[in-house]
Amino acid sequence: MDRGVLKVILLAVFLISATSDPVTKTQDVNIYSFYINSTVTSRYATTIITSRVANRLNESQEIFFEVKIPKNAFISKFRMTIDGKSYDGVVKEKADAQQQYSRAVSRGQSAGLIKSVGRTLEEFKTSVNVAALSKVTFELTYEELLKRRLGKYELLINAQPMQAVKDFKINVHIHEKPGISFLEVKGDLSTDDLANAIKTTRADKDAWVTFYPTRDQQKRCKNCDKNGLKGDLLITYDVERQNPNGEMTVSNGYFVHNFAPSGLPRISKNVVFIIDRSASMGGKKMWQTRLALLRILSDLAEDDHFGLITFDHQIELWKRELLKATKANLDDAKSFVKNIKDRGSTDINAAVLEGVKMINRHPQEGTASILILLTDGDPTTGETYLTRILSNVRKAIGSKFPLYCLGFGYDVSFDFLTQMSLENNGVARRIYEDSDADLQLQGFYNEVAVPLLTDIQLNYIGVSDLTQNNFTLYFNGSEIVVSGKITDNNVESISTDVIAISKGNKVTYHDAVITKDVTDVLPKDFMERLWAYLTVKQLLDKHPVQEAVKKEALKLSLKYQFVTPLTSMFVTKPQKVGSHKIHSEAPHLTCEMLWLTPSDCDEGITLDFPMRPVSHDDYDFQIKRPVFYASFYLAAGENSNRFLLAADGQSQPLCFDVLLHHKLRLLEDSSREFYMNGESQTTKTGFSKIAFYYKKTHNLTITTNSISYRNDQDNVDLLWGQNFALSYTDGVDLIITHNKINVSMGDFSVSVLLHKNDGGVYLWPAVQQYPQDGSPTGIFGKYNISYEKAHEFNNPTLKIMDKNVNVRWVYLKDSTKHSIPNVHCWLVSFDDVMNRNISDFIVTQI
């Protein structure tokens, strides 16, 4: 989402249930109002999307609301208004929200779950069942601190409501205390045919931008299609900067300091470019990379020093030492760049460590050192274990200089690059495979091309709970932001000292704000929320794996109702369970027998669902009468795979769900060099591909159509239905039948079953043997879990790893057997049973 500008991407997509005539069906959902209201105060943006939808059919429809927002934003509010009554989302710890969501869905309730996708926070989704001829209103709010790049803040609003809307409005209000120095509106929607729909108004400290296109304009404009508007509105601005000490804003016991000095001499830099030349960088990617590097080399100042490293499975240096950017050296470097060819695999670990060595061999006082890595894939050779690469790079750099990572394309492991950058005082940026990719690369370089200060320390008197207040580098056109609490509300002034190095010389900035003279009126909790946002963001960015840090970030996320990688937002429409007659063989059920609270259903109702009596094992809940479980707690739906997990000392297994569309780390033991990954099917349960890697020489890929095995000597390609037995060195044995392959690799044994039923085909692995002394990880790596029953009458719970968690009694289709029997299990959230987030198990390549 980073392309040299701040992107606020709002994509409202409304989908309806499947039909043989999707075009006609879509017309039965009418979006009659669509508003985007964004308020920016002191660079902190609060954006509200409000969409009103009518179901024009004589039958109910499930309508999905999907929105994409920038990775730096936190959703803070979601509301659905149905039949005149509003239902607000509540932010909870991710596991708790997932449990409530699963419980609501299992009862057939309308429910929505908003959660982050990985750590990028790019997509949020919810749905509601709208009654016939009824209306629903979706209202989503998110908050974000805008970043300054190249001397400007940019707010990009992308409008794509999927149909022409009668009442369509975008309103943006910007308020900046020091005054607005310039403002510009452009973008795909700022065209001649829509010019009269855009209005801009400016005052000293305020600016307003409105965009009110008519319904006819939404259908006929240049950037429109049959589904209405499709484009963006770009608002660019900056603030007046008369005080070189920065801008201090104080309100309601909190402060924020925006520091962006200018007029300083540039600092010469030592920059090393580390360029991926692996085979996947071929074609247009490599051409654009070479073009961008040639332009960047031309922009180096003569007192800069630079180096070039290219890598695949081997490392190649243009020169062993950093050289001064003279014309002769630049001409020689450009010849080197023109001859970079794609080839081989990807050894990121060795390449980055070589870049660190190059900078360390060239120490210079009063200069700024920078590493820039460009890659389009995962590490596939050398050191491939991501945790060890992160540790190696972190130890080598030692916080001495920043590492910037540029991820080329969508297949790159961007979470890995982001973490590696953040751990080393840099940032990661995704480079999109568009026609302007070379300009994106050059645009990023321009952001770090002119360092003005190094070793910046911001000190304050009379404050506490500071956000980050020391920085390695400050670049021209950027901004440093620090916030904190005022320890004494009676203090008359807040003072700050900024100490930094400017071209080898120590510089100091001193300022003080008289709190009594603060006249700029802000919303009561505005400054507090800005502080909380910045604190949580930095906690998650810098130390995502430290338990104490996660605990503090979670605490603040819950307090301020931010949806972060540690939380989810849960919203459900409470419903009464309708009264039906039950099957004759089933006894009368009450709400409490179904573990429903009185608010969920009327006491004494009956339900039209077949029932089954529990086993004798269920009596240790100390319930005085027989209990029955409703079988409408269904198996995993079309959007998830459900995994079975045997529990030590218990006859009743656990199970957990993983959403589809994932490439998963299924089983891994790096000490034995064994890896099994799987790619889920996109619309149905099961896997479409499973791959094994063993000792770097054995590679087995299984799809629903074929089986392919590779090692140093042999290439074997087979089709399902062929019976083969293959045996190789290193304890590798493959036994293939018409619908199963038994895979033995060292101490691991796995059967992969091919299922064909209900018109579908899918794969499913069944782990048969683990090493006795191993510590495998992955989805199937949890083999020694145990639990205790800790029943609460209306809320069944299990004690897992000393934590009480909510569970549901569900059916599961056991795909580890060809007969696919139905079994029962306790449904537990993924986080509770694995004690880790699903993002830790996602891979980018099979």
Image: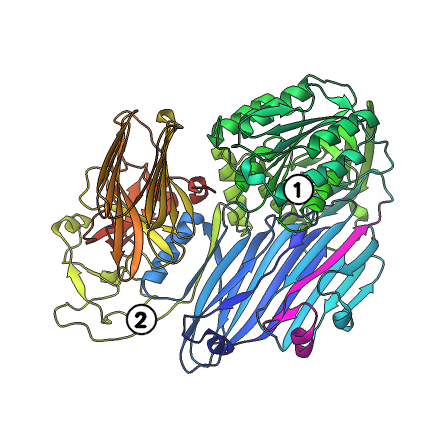
Residue 584 in picture, x, y percent from top left: 13, 72
Residue at 51% over, 56% down:
124
Say above or below: 127 vs 45.
below
Residue 110 appears in the picture as rendered: yes
Residue 577 - label: 2
Q: Are marks 2 and 1 in contact (CB under 8 Å)?
A: no
Mark 2–mark 1 Cα distance, whole angstroms, equals: 62 Å
Residue 828 in picture, x, y percent from top left: 32, 48
In the image, the segment drawn in magenta is: 215-241
Say above or below: 170 vs 391.
below
Q: In the image, is residue 226 part of the stretch drawn in magenta?
A: yes
Residue 287 - label: 1
Q: Horizontal placement of 108 versus 459: left or right? A: left
Secondary structure state at the residue bearing disc 1: helix
Quarter of the view holding residue 283: top right
Q: Horizontal placement of 329 versus 845: left or right? A: right
Say above or below: 692 vs 139.
above
The mark tally for this picture is 2
Residue 176 appears in the picture as rendered: no
Residue 144 in picture, x, y percent from top left: 64, 51
- Of 814 and 463, nearer the camera is 814
Q: Which of marks 2 and 1 is nearer the N terminus?
A: 1
Residue 385 in picture, x, y percent from top left: 46, 30
Q: Mark 2 belongs to which amino acid?
A: Val
Quarter of the view holding residue 715: top left
Q: In the image, is residue 489 part of the stretch drawn in magenta?
A: no
Q: In the image, which is nearer the foreground, mark 2 or mark 1?
A: 1
